[in-house]
Amino acid sequence: MFTGILALVALGSCLAQAKPFPDKALGLTSVRALDGSAVNIRAELPSCFFFITVDCPIANRYAPEISRIVKEYSRRQVDFYIVYVDPAHGVEAVEKHAREFGLKATIVRDVKHEVVRKVFASITPEVAVVRGDALLYRGRIDGSYVEHGPPVRTPYRKDLRIALDELLGGGKVTVKETTAVGCPIPPVGAEPRT
């Protein structure tokens, strides 16, 4: 099983390579929260979408940093969405994972990959920052994982934090895209599990 997970993680790294970076309106104006309610994306504020699954080891290791970012930047007028992208994980599994890992933001279960397709996400964990229906940043949360294996121990770039700070400071994101390292986003069509 461990070998299978490593193979998926390696495949995910390859898939993250050449993908388009949309330069037109995404059509991402609302999402469906886990409880089924529609949540409008506020166009005037940056919105940050974390793409994760319940069983990606690297995504799970990022949960504490995701929580810190959500806590810190929510106060600074950034909206956050935790987007669960594996159609095989049912509502109960998603709720349990979010609770156990302390993920406190709007939870979205993107079983048809509507959000995934709009921003061309392919890896978990991967993050997309949107404002005014435009993609401003997509890629890794930070440089603590540059390849599969243990995180780096030397200082690394905090890509998402830098992008958000640039936006909140009135500027433009200087590095719009980075390569995320993790697990590939599973295909649509899997049967839900609890």
Image (spheres, grey):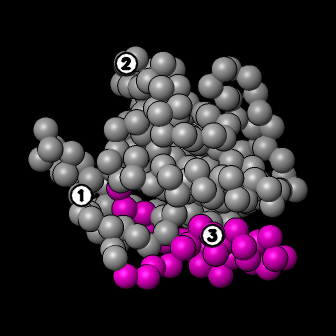
Q: Is residue 109 among what the camera can see?
A: yes
Q: Residues within 10 Å of mark 1 (few under 14, many from 20)?
A: some
Name the one closer to the observer, 96 or 22: 96
Q: Residues within 10 Å of mark 3 (few under 14, many from 20)?
A: some
Residue 162 screen position, x and y as percent: 64, 75
Identify the image quadrant of residue 93. top left
Q: Earlier in the sequence, mark 2 or mark 3?
A: 3
Q: Is residue 113 among what the camera can see?
A: no
Quadrant of the image for the C terminus? top left
Q: Amino acid at mark 1?
A: Ala
Question: Residue 10, labelled with which disc?
Answer: 1
Identify the image quadrant of residue 143. bottom left
Q: In the shown orientation, is residue 186 left or right of residue 41?
A: left
Q: Residue at (84%, 52%) from the top-left corner?
A: 43
Name the one closer to the observer, 187 or 164: 164
Q: Amino acid at mark 3?
A: Arg
Q: Residue at (66%, 20%) from the top-left corner?
A: 35
**Discs 1, 3 touching: Cβ within 8 Å:** no
Q: Earlier in the sequence, mark 1 or mark 3?
A: 1
Residue 144 screen position, x and y as percent: 40, 70
Q: Tell which residue pokes out farthest to the right in this image.
A: 44
Task: Give the residues in magenta.
Answer: 154-182
Question: Residue 193, labelled with which disc?
Answer: 2
Q: Residues within 10 Å of mark 2 (few under 14, many from 20)?
A: few
